[in-house]
């Protein structure tokens, strides 16, 4: 059967709305696609908008063919065709632009709307944030409203939107059931690696790197503890371990991996879940020292967590750590690496260490470590984000001249001094601290919490953590850095609770946004098979899997459909006729102006009396009378005409002549 509406002309308002909507939906792709691809699409959109008033500028078939060839060439030469995600998206965008240039009938708009839905889906290949999802959801509602309008002769935007929202409300229960009970993948639905990632800690440290990173207030990862929260002095988040140095630069070198079972889990183990932001690196972070980690994670000989793939998307994993675990063994290879020195060591450094040796018991190397920490504490060192340029022997210049540095200056110089003293040492980079979100159950560790510390190997104690930064700035352990104020200060400024109403409201809004963002990731984007199992376990259906899950899905879907059907059958009151209410509003205006309007008189008589009393408003009164009579006694009541009548009555002013 042929669609009777398909041959009708395209409503101008509907087409304009569609073109503007597609332009808005395409805007977020500015962060993903080549600007020339978007320029092609927006040029086609503008061309079609102009063609609404000047149909003669619509391209002919031969021109469309040339544009198509040019569009394909544009995709090939501006996009990495080896990346199917980018190439496919770019091709869809230019094809949609070409489709806009051949819109001539309603059936063409139907196809264009469906292409718009595909454009919405492509955004999630690059970004799955809540804010983008909310923006695109509004766009989907608008696209559906346009579809509703295509099935009507007249365009009534309010009615179209109401019908669209009603359809979405009816589909919501079934969508929830399918989302919660449909068998999940082991990885998130949108688990596509992205080449873009935020800055993260790497397996290399050069003086100044961590200071630069700590100027960022972005989130590094979020942590949810399953039990007691460790004290601030225990919240060291272990990352790469650095062994090799030339004095100014530290690198990790090649480290073997071993089985996770080699790290024993003690009675005081702390369980937690980390949601790590993209870093583009292989390193994961765990509370020092990790005793239990995900099955897909490797643990190298330094007890650092290593992912099998680069972390190019937000990742959630569970781990456990034992704060009492001690790494008591040291191999011959580690002994050699822990004592490796640069080709040239400053005589001043050797002299400083010799002075400490003279004051310490050679059989008690811990005394020498404590003497070195006392040196950092007693000398006028400054903990700052602006250490200035270091030239030549950077460690010598830092220790004896500038004495200004960030945590990598203190950690790198301390580890080198320990090696000169014959004590194996290594630098650990990661994060320290974290802030509790007052509106949720998780802690936030920011890039400004990036930190470096030292591990020294001592007989009977094993690898022992030493934080020389804490000897200079003890507040670093208990309080987070304020990166904005620290950049404009001679010393590092630590964060304090904002005072005042505006500051408190802003900070609470940021914490709420953080909590909502993490909830969106956990229960929507990252709703994996494991999280689905945990949810079913919470409601007492822990054994539901396989066939049982399929049966539950079928039953739940049937119940959702039945619920929507029953709700649709509930009798609803008739929609109130707006015309009597408008007429009463007019009568109240006339009565306040002194015009008698008995209820038994008709609109013609009342308006005529009012026109004689207020001759300057006679034209308005007669127009109101004609519109009301036409709407009240005519065959059809157009919503736009009712709105026009409402405006005339609201604008009516009755003043004595």
Image: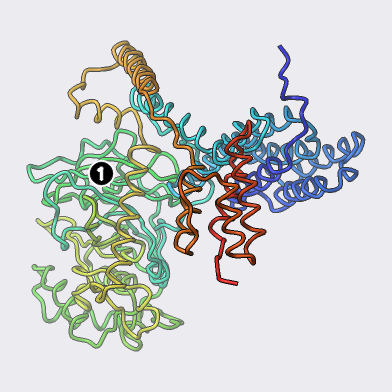
Q: Is residue 343 visible?
A: no
With respect to residue 326, does 489 lie above or below? below
Q: Is residue 318 visible?
A: yes
How packed mark 1 is, by other alpha carbons closer than 10 Å (few <14, some 14-19, many 20 or more), is some
Which quadrant holds residue 152?
top right
Q: Nearer the viewer, residue 479 or 298?
A: 479
Image x and y of residue 309, in percent: 44, 40
Image x and y of residue 568, in percent: 40, 22
Looking at the image, which residue is at 61% across and 32% down? 147
Question: In this rendering, would 36 be left or right of 561?
Answer: right
Question: Considering the image in quadrants, where does the C terminus appear?
Answer: bottom right
Q: Nearer the viewer, residue 359 or 445?
A: 445
Look at the image and name its color scheme.
Answer: rainbow
Which secondary structure lies at badge 1?
strand
Looking at the image, which residue is at 22% across and 78% down? 472
Looking at the image, which residue is at 48% across and 29% down? 167
Image x and y of residue 204, in percent: 41, 60
Looking at the image, which residue is at 40% across and 60% down? 251
Q: Nearer the viewer, residue 215 or 111?
A: 111
Which quadrant holds residue 547?
top left
Which quadrant holds residue 293?
top left
With respect to residue 571, does 29 lie above or below? below
Question: In this rendering, would 544 be left or right of 187?
Answer: left
Q: Which residue is mark 1?
A: 273
With respect to residue 293, does 335 lie above or below? below
Question: In this rendering, would 49 be left or right of 290?
Answer: right
């Amino acid at each position: 059967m042929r669609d009777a509406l398909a041959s009708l002309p395209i409503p101008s308002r509907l087409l304009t709305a569609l073109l503007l909507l597609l332009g808005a939906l395409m805007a977020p792709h500015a962060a993903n696609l080549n600007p020339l691809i978007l320029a092609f699409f927006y040029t086609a959109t503008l061309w079609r908008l102009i063609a609404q008033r000047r149909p003669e500028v619509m391209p002919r078939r031969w021109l469309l063919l040339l544009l198509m060839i040019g569009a394909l060439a544009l995709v090939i030469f501006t996009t990495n065709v080896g990346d199917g995600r980018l190439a496919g998206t770019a091709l869809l965008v230019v094809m949609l632009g070409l489709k806009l240039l051949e819109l001539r009938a309603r059936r063409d708009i139907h196809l264009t709307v469906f292409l718009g839905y595909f454009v919405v889906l492509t955004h999630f290949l690059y970004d799955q944030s809540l804010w983008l999802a909310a923006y695109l959801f509004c766009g989907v509602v608008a696209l559906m409203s346009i579809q509703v309008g295509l099935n009507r002769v007249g365009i009534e935007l309010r009615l179209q939107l109401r019908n669209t929202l009603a359809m979405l409300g009816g589909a919501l229960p079934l969508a929830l059931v399918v989302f919660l009970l449909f068998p999940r993948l082991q990885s998130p639905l949108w688990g596509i690696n992205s080449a873009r990632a935020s800055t993260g800690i790497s397996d290399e440290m050069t003086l100044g790197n961590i200071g630069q990173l700590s100027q960022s207030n972005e989130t590094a990862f979020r942590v949810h503890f399953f039990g007691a929260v460790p004290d601030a002095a225990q919240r060291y988040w272990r990352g790469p371990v650095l062994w090799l140095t030339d004095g100014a630069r530290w690198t990790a070198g090649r480290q073997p991996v071993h089985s996770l079972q080699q790290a024993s889990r003690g009675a005081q183990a702390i369980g937690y879940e980390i949601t790590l932001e993209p870093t583009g690196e292989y390193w994961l972070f765990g509370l020092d020292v990790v005793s239990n980690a995900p099955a897909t994670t490797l643990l190298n000989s330094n007890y650092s967590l290593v992912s099998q793939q680069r972390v190019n998307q937000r990742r959630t994993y569970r781990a456990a750590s034992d704060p009492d675990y001690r790494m008591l063994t040291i191999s011959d290879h580690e002994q050699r690496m822990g004592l490796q020195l640069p080709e040239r060591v400053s005589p001043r450094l050797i002299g400083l260490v010799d002075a400490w040796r003279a004051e310490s018991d050679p059989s008690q190397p811990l005394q020498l470590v404590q003497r070195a920490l006392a040196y950092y504490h007693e000398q006028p060192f400054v903990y700052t984000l602006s250490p200035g340029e270091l030239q030549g022997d950077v460690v010598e210049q830092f220790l004896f001249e500038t004495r200004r540095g960030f945590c990598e200056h203190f950690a790198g110089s301390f580890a080198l001094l320990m090696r000169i003293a014959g004590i194996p040492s290594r630098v650990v980079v990661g994060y320290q601290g974290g802030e509790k979100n007052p509106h949720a159950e998780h802690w936030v560790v920011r890039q400004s919490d990036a930190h470096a510390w030292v591990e020294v190997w001592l007989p009977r104690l094993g690898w022992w953590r030493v934080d020389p930064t804490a000897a200079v700035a003890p507040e670093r352990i208990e309080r987070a850095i304020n990166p904005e104020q620290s950049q404009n200060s001679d010393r590092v400024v630590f964060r304090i609770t904002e005072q005042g109403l505006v500051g408190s409201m802003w900070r609470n809004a940021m914490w709420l946004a953080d909590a909502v963002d993490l909830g969106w990731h956990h229960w929507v984007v990252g709703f994996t098979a494991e999280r689905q199992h945990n949810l079913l376990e919470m409601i007492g259906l822990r054994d539901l899997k396989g066939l049982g899950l399929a049966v539950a899905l079928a039953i739940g879907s049937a119940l959702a459909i039945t619920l929507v059907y029953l709700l649709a059958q509930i009798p609803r009151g008739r929609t109130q006729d707006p015309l009597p209410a408008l007429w009463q509003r007019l009568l109240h205006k006339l009565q306040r102006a002194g015009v008698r309007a008995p209820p038994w008189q008709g609109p013609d008589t009342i308006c005529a009396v009012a026109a004689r009393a207020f001759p300057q408003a006679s034209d308005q009164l007669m127009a109101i009378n004609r519109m009301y009579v036409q709407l009240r006694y005519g065959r059809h009541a157009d919503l736009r005409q009712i709105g026009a009548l409402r405006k005339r009555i609201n604008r009516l002013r009755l003043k004595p002549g």
